[in-house]
Image: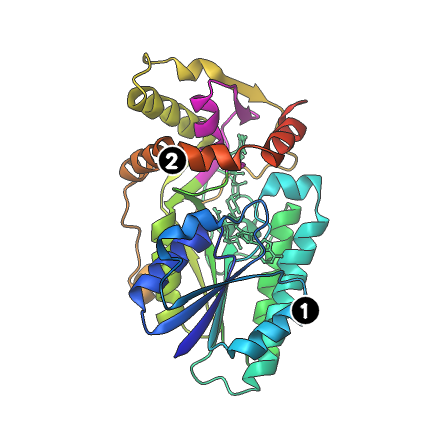
Amino acid sequence: MKKILVTGGAGFIGSHLVRLLVKKYPDTLFVNLDLLTYAGNLANLTDIQDYPNYEFVKGDIVDEEFIMATFDAYQFDGVIHLAAESHVDRSIASPKEFIMTNIVGTVNLLNAARFYWKDKYEGKRFYHVSTDEVYGSLGDEGKFMETTPYDPRSPYSASKASSDHLVRAYHHTYGLPVVISNCSNNYGPNQFPEKLIPLIINNIRHSKPLPVYGQGTNIRDWLYVEDHAKAIDLIYEKGVDGETYNIGGNNERQNIDIVKTLCRIIDRQLGRPEGESEKLITYVKDRAGHDLRYAIDATKIYENLGWQPEVQFNDGFEKTVAWYLENEKWLDEVTSGNYLKYYEKMYRDR
Ligand code: NAD
Ligand code: TDX
């Protein structure tokens, strides 16, 4: 049986990807290796936990011995690497964990793949799931292409840029068969409510202030998470070794428009008077080094592999809001305990 290691499969994107892969490829074993940090949650995967081609292993990619032992035990044919510290604000407050997990953790996985594949790379593949933030910040014009020079500006994006470079270096130096994708902002169910969209939904639900950084005019290119998972599957199956693919939603929005749209949809879905939630919008101190605009040119993946987003933004947004409102238990569980401390620390003096 073919065996694929997915790291970070209990997180937001990872859980959508693991679900897709486990259901689509019943003859392949998918091993989900995840440390279950604050962002990892096995409740995201209850529907597939008993599938015969799925296993969960709890562990830390920074722990070299553990990674080598896991490769030794399973003899993986491929790796899809998503495990990461993923929140920009946390990277500003505390960069070191980002260096450890995103850089050292990635190197541990690369070394293990190299060691166990012993230069016999037929049928093997190492896939690094990365971000458009490695390209830096755009002005009013232009989009990120695969050829755009790297210009990371936060500790998070610098750590992801660094791991991208290391993945490419292992390809050029040792011939490791790698692919990389750089994706824009994802939204959808199961996203931890430190990120803009679920945080705003949760605050509207509790009629708490809605913190908008700066003027709210920064722009992100939003993609529904299941479209990202489908792109990862396609790149893993059909991408060319050594290549990078940009993935994006062709769907640029200012943050303030995202927040106002959420207010409107939630007021309607909860039967609140129109305009009620918009009163909660509060402009707060800007994020340090806040990138102005991200936008992806996804021509390469469209022309070479035939991928394009399937979910329209309006439909994806309605579905996303409905999911959080229907899954209050999930939201309540992840927003209790340490989350309250995190929120207090990040937003108290803003
Ligand atoms: P997430 O924070 O929701 O999940 C990260 C997962 O990694 C969690 O399950 C966590 O427990 C696990 N993890 C963290 N440290 C670990 C460690 N040391 N060892 C093992 N597991 C560990 O992140 P996400 O939003 O699902 O992002 C997944 C990947 O996609 C990341 O690499 C991120 O950089 C990239 N990405 C995210 C977005 C986005 O919009 N969220 C966009 C582009 C790329
Ligand atoms: O409370 C908030 N208020 C606010 O105005 C938060 C949490 C965010 N924002 C702004 C900052 C950004 O301009 O909203 C925008 C989106 O912020 P995040 O959800 O934190 O995402 P971003 O910083 O754009 O990074 C995301 O996309 C790329 C993911 O977190 C990364 O993991 C991914 O690589």
In reply to whether residue 201 is colored magenta, the answer given is: yes
| x then y, percent, for residue 28 | 37, 73
Residue in the foreground of this view, choosing between 147 and 269: 269
Residue 142 sits above or below residue 84 on the image:
above
Q: Nearer the viewer, residue 83 or 180?
A: 83
Locate residue 30: give its quadrant.
Answer: bottom left
- Against 12, is 276 above or below? above
Q: Measured from the top left, where is residue 137 in percent x and y?
A: 55, 44
Foreground of the two, 194 or 335: 335
Where residue 151 sits: x, y (%)? 61, 52
- State which quadrant residue 141 falls in: top left
Identified at 45% across, 55% down, the residue is: 14
Task: List the residue tagged with mark 2.
Answer: 327
Amino acid type, callout 1: Glu
Residue 245 belongs to magenta span: no
Above or below: residue 276 compared with residue 329 = above
What amino acid is found at the position of numbered circle 2 in the picture?
A: Asn
Q: Quadrant of the N terminus?
A: bottom left
Q: Secondary structure at mark 1?
A: helix
In the image, what residue occupies the spot 64% across and 52% down? 158
Q: Nearer the viewer, mark 1 or mark 2?
A: 2
Residue 103 in sight: yes
The residue labelled by disc 1 is: 64
Q: Which residue is at the front of the view, 276 or 178?
A: 276
Q: Is residue 184 toward the left or the right of residue 266 in the image? A: right
Whole-percent x, y for residue 165 in the image: 60, 65
Residue at 60 percent of width and 50 percent of height? 85
Which span of residues is magenta-colored? 193-220
